[in-house]
């Protein structure tokens, strides 16, 4: 079988990879109108790659049926304006079914969430991703790596077995480890996406990343896109200037093992009147005492 040409999808990963939030109504159901409006705002701002069912989209708090709705809604709203990288995962049959659904909905790529299992062997990691990738050979496949013990040789092996594994969302908070892993796996073989968003993007770009994920982009698309432009130009003083501006916001999200990661983004959107602040357990809405802080940070940006 001829391997599909993934050139355009590889280019889409070397960009700001937006992770949209999933808005909810007052009764806790999906707010599809707000969801479409937020996606339209991202697209109008110049975002060209989106990941429905990512962690900022509360993937683990959605039902299987809701994840299908989010996938279909996103692909319908995006049309041909952006690449869609659908988050899939959980147990292997569920992940394969979600990948096949993404294919039937005409997505171009799937991102495979870090296996949600307390006992992950390195060979088992390869097998898990191989089964998913082989089920959808027409789609680009992007493993989401959060395991610092995984060796780059296992990703290289997966790439040998599955040529549709075209990129990596690397989210281990260690720039040195990232640079070594990328070179062990094949720096030019995969597209390397800094999976810990804007605060890690400058150091990961030095190590070989060419794109980064973002939840902040939901709030201020221009800020994320300007950071990408500075990094592409090699203008690290400008990049770090943006980094300093967004640092307080991103540190709020990262505090207490990222307990309020999604919460802070939705609070910022609520302060702009773009969606409700509601999140699902085990996340929590931001306490009243901290809401003015988030609104104040966002007020200082061009959104």
Image (cartoon, rainbow, N blue to C red):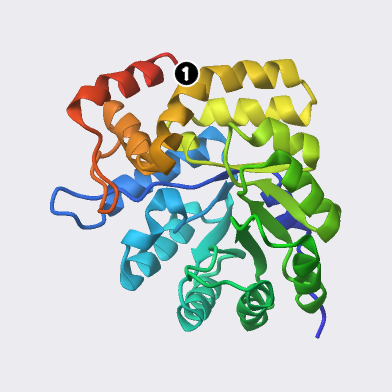
* Vertical order, 301 against 255 (above or below): above
Residue at position x 75%, y 41% from top? 176
* Vertical order, 110 against 82 (above or below): below
Q: How crowded is mark 1: few (under 14 residues within 10 Å), some or many (20 or more)?
A: few
In the rendered structure, the answer to whether residue 220 lies left or right of residue 61 reads right
Which quadrant would residue 132 be assigned to in this image? Answer: bottom right
Count of residue discs: 1
Instruction: List x then y, in percent, for residue 18.
Output: 53, 44
Q: What element carries label 1?
A: loop
Instruction: List x then y, in percent, for residue 61.
Output: 32, 60
Residue at position x 71%, y 33% from top? 203
Instruction: List x then y, in percent, for residue 178.
Output: 73, 47
* Vertical order, 69 against 231 (above or below): below
Which quadrant would residue 210 be assigned to in this image? Answer: top right
Residue at position x 32%, y 39% from top? 263
Residue at position x 34%, y 48% from top? 35
The residue most toward the left is: 27
Instruction: List x then y, in percent, for residue 40.
Output: 43, 43
Q: Mark 1 points at which residue?
A: 302
């Amino acid at each position: 079988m001829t391997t599909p040409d993934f050139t355009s999808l590889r280019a889409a990963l070397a960009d700001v990879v937006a992770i949209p939030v999933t808005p909810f109504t007052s009764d806790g159901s999906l707010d599809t109108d707000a969801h479409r409006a937020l996606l339209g705002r991202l697209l109008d701002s110049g975002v060209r790659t989106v990941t429905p069912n990512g962690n900022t989209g509360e993937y683990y708090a959605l039902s299987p049926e809701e994840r299908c709705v989010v996938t279909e809604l996103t692909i319908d709203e995006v049309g041909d304006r952006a690449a869609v990288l659908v988050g899939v995962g959980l147990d292997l049959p569920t992940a394969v079914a979600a990948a096949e659904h993404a294919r039937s909905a005409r997505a171009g790529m799937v991102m495979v969430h870090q296996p949600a299992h307390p006992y992950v062997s390195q060979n088992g990691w390869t097998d898990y991703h191989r089964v998913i990738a082989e089920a959808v050979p027409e789609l680009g496949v992007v493993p989401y790596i959060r395991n610092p013990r995984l060796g780059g040789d296992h990703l290289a092996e997966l790439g040998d077995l599955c040529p549709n594994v075209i990129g990596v969302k690397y989210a281990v908070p260690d720039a040195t480890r990232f640079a070594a892993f990328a070179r062990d796996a094949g720096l030019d073989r995969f597209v390397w996406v800094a999976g810990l968003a804007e605060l890690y993007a400058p150091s990961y770009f030095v190590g070989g990343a060419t794109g980064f994920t973002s939840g902040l982009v939901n709030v201020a698309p221009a800020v994320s896109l300007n950071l990408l432009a500075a990094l592409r130009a090699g203008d690290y003083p400008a990049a770090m200037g943006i980094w300093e501006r967004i640092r307080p916001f991103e540190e709020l999200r990262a505090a207490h093992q990222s307990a309020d990661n999604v919460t802070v983004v939705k609070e910022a959107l609520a302060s702009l009147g773009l969606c409700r602040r509601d999140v699902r357990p085990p996340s929590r809405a931001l306490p009243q005492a901290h809401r003015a802080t988030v609104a104040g940070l966002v007020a200082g940006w061009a959104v």
